[in-house]
Amino acid sequence: MIVIGLMSGTSADGIDAAVVKLERDHADAGLRWQLLKHINLPFEQALRDEILACCAPATASVDRVCALNAELGEAYAAACFAAAQEAGLSISQIDLIGSHGQTVWHIPAKATLQIGAAAVIAERTGVTTVSDFRSRDIAAGGQGAPLVAYVDALLFTHPTKRRALQNIGGIGNVTFLPAGHFGDGNAPGLAFDTGPGNMMMDYAAEQATNGAWRYDEDGQLARRGRVDGALLEELMDHDFIRRDPPKTTGREEFGAFFARRMCDAATARGAKSEDIVATFTAFTALSIADAYRRFLPAMPEEVFVSGGGALNPALMDMLRAEMPSTRITTSDELNMPAAAKEAVCFAALAYETIQNRPGNLPSATGAKRAVVLGSITPGNHFTAETQRHGAGNNS
């Protein structure tokens, strides 16, 4: 099948769309994948502002969230057309779409809300769309995240080396892969959110540049600043850092409200804006390394970083300094472009869903059992027969 995976993360900076060819020889075989194309479409500033407003209790309202749900559906559908075109395909050649949606609020192990109407995506494209992946895991007693752990284990487990797959999007999350063969009873020993990723750095960079930058480009601001030791110590005292896995987090704990409070406290002590960016960058690096030391059964021999954080050399240097005995590189070394990884994962999860295979790992999310994830919105020619054979396109 040719599947488009869609991802817009907690940074709310845009849509990643990955066109992926996926197949298995039989039910027990490993999943073969080929990335045909990855594109990133930044959100227009007005749309990004509305997303951030709908993620904040002080400004969100039911009418705004309702309208944004439909508007994002249109944006995701447009991203599918653009990705297919960039891959040299017509939309009729796409078999399936997997859309993570935009997280508005996440209450670990209780409820979660990702919006971006799947009905709009399926109606505009004619392609069967899988969405709302996290709710089923929560219904089964899990945290609803991290769901990429299943795909990490499926695609990247090494027979002899301990690996960690570290994503650094708005939030950081890790999948620990013990050596072995996934499918032979081997599953990640652990997967969980490590804490903030780019979210706080992005906020500080916007403040430092009066809104000219959405993020710290190439880590320039962090490199010009000095880490505020007192602020870093206060940040590392956050309750989430010490909380035992399984655990997930988001804007609710590390969003603008928390970042603003920390910025104000640092500014009051005389810290410069570049110092705050440097300190928030160090917080992300240290929280990741600290989580490995606290919670992993053993330190990984190699770490593969994906997400926007992998493209920040200042952050990567700080991460390597925190774990000098571990080889740290990007997921590009696994033929998985760092910026494309999460979108590829949701393409794979949609493929598993349409094949009626579970897509969560209870060892990662804390769910009571493995469950088939997501809600299926049929495309133009979706039938029970095509679902059984894993085809739901509009050809």
Image: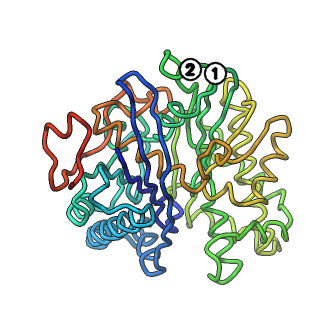
Q: Nearer the viewer, residue 121 or 88?
A: 88
Res 205 → quadrant: bottom right
The label on residue 137 is none
230 lies above or below 152: below
Q: Which residue is mark 2?
A: 181
In this picture, residue 382 sits left or right of residue 219 = left
Residue at the far top: name it: 184
Say which residue appears at 72% left-offset and 60% top-offset: 312
Q: Secondary structure at mark 2?
A: loop
Residue 276 position, x and y percent, is 76, 67
Q: Residues within 10 Å of mark 1 (few under 14, many from 20)?
A: few
Q: Which residue is mark 1?
A: 159
Say which residue appears at 28% left-offset and 39% top-offset: 354
Sequence order check, earlier mark of 1 and 2:
1
Residue 289 position, x and y percent, is 74, 41
Residue 297 position, x and y percent, is 67, 23
In this picture, residue 100 sits left or right of residue 255 = left
Q: Nearer the viewer, residue 61 or 131?
A: 131
211 lies above or below 249: below
Say which residue appears at 63% left-offset and 43% top-offset: 166
Q: Are marks 1 and 2 in contact (CB under 8 Å)?
A: yes
Quadrant holding the N terminus:
top left
Q: Nearer the viewer, residue 276 or 384?
A: 384
Q: Amino acid at mark 2?
A: His
Q: Amino acid at mark 1?
A: Pro
In this picture, residue 30 sits left or right of residue 215 = left
Q: Secondary structure at mark 1?
A: loop
C-alpha gap between disc 1 and disc 2: 6 Å
Quadrant holding the C terminus:
bottom left
Q: Residues within 10 Å of mark 2 (few under 14, many from 20)?
A: some
